Image (cartoon, helix red, strand yellow):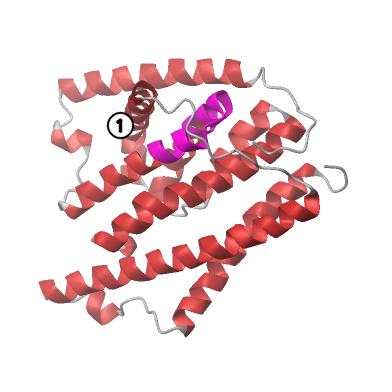
Amino acid sequence: MAGKPFWVDAMVVVLLFIIAQAVATVACMAMGLRMPGVAMTTSFDAEVLENADSMQARFIAITYLVSMVIFYISMFIYQRMRGWSSKGWFNMRGCTPVRLLAGYLLIWCISIVVEPLSEALPGDQDMLGNGGWLLFSSVLLAPIFEESLFRGYMTGILRKAYGGMAAWIVPAVTFGVIHAIPSVVISATLMGLVLGYLYLHYRSLGLVVMLHAMNNLTACFLRMMDMGDMTVSGLLSEGPWYWALYAVCAVVLGVTFVKMYRNISGIKVENNTSIE
């Protein structure tokens, strides 16, 4: 993997992701797909609002699918140019029920601990739409696309060149930033650290894809049940039970991230052409 610096490779991966999204959006609009207009999204008619949600979710899902195809074709060409091998990188090793449950509960701990800050930051996710198209994009497409990009390509590139710490932190921060919505960025970054650690530790893309899908499925379920704005603090009325739960989650996160840091710091640079 001689030649250009590895950080350039990581930037190329992100750039290809952005370009794929932009090209897919233009292509889908050229084919006649549209987001709902302001008149629909601000209507007082429940049926019109439901149609607007469906239109939004359909546009996002189809655009996302097209961008995935563009990205994977582009990455296949770039891999061939760079002489990389990613054979066997999408595997299910380490994907056990216990690890899935532990990871899922840890992600919930993150949601609870950052909830007060998220509530203070602007941003909502109404633009995602609702219904079956939302499930298709959020539970199937997004976990596969985003995990292969951030935990697969980026983490693999950075681990080979700079060791575990860069491979753990940089993809997680980038993962958080691309979510753009201020109230989501911090929780997405912390979630990226959890997923990044699990990928580096078990070398299992299947494990992190499943966890990502479980998290998004929970969010979609709450949204479809009109509980998307529900908070743990509101549910428990910020009483003693809430603060006890908050304290437990904070301690669990603190101990877990210290352990992750210690384990990741021991991962050294690897000199080979695989990006597994």
Residue 191: x and y in percent read 44, 36
Residue receiving disc 1: 112
Residue 165 appears left or right of 270: left
Residue 1 appears left or right of 92: right
- Quick one: which residue is furthest to the front in this view? 88
191 in relation to 77, above or below:
above
183 in relation to 239, above or below:
below
251 in relation to 173, above or below:
above
Residue 145: x and y in percent read 50, 52
Residue 62: x and y in percent read 41, 68
Q: Is residue 203 magenta-colored?
A: yes
Picture quadrant of residue 22 = bottom right
Start and end of the magenta stretch? Answer: 194-211
Residue 221 appears left or right of 115: left
- Quick one: which residue is furthest to the right in this view? 3
Residue at 59%, 41% in the rendered image: 152
SS label for mark 1:
helix
Residue at 45%, 68% in the rendered image: 63
Q: Is residue 220 visible?
A: yes
Q: What residue type is labelled 1?
A: Ile
Q: Quadrant of the N terminus?
A: top right
Q: Is residue 49 magenta-colored?
A: no
Residue at 59%, 58% in the rendered image: 72
Mark 1 is surrounded, within 10 Å at the Cα level, by few (under 14), some (14 to 19) or many (20 or more) other residues, namely: many
| Magenta stretch: dominant secondary structure | helix
Q: In which quarter of the image is the C terminus?
A: top right
29 in relation to 135, above or below:
below
Residue 119: x and y in percent read 31, 44
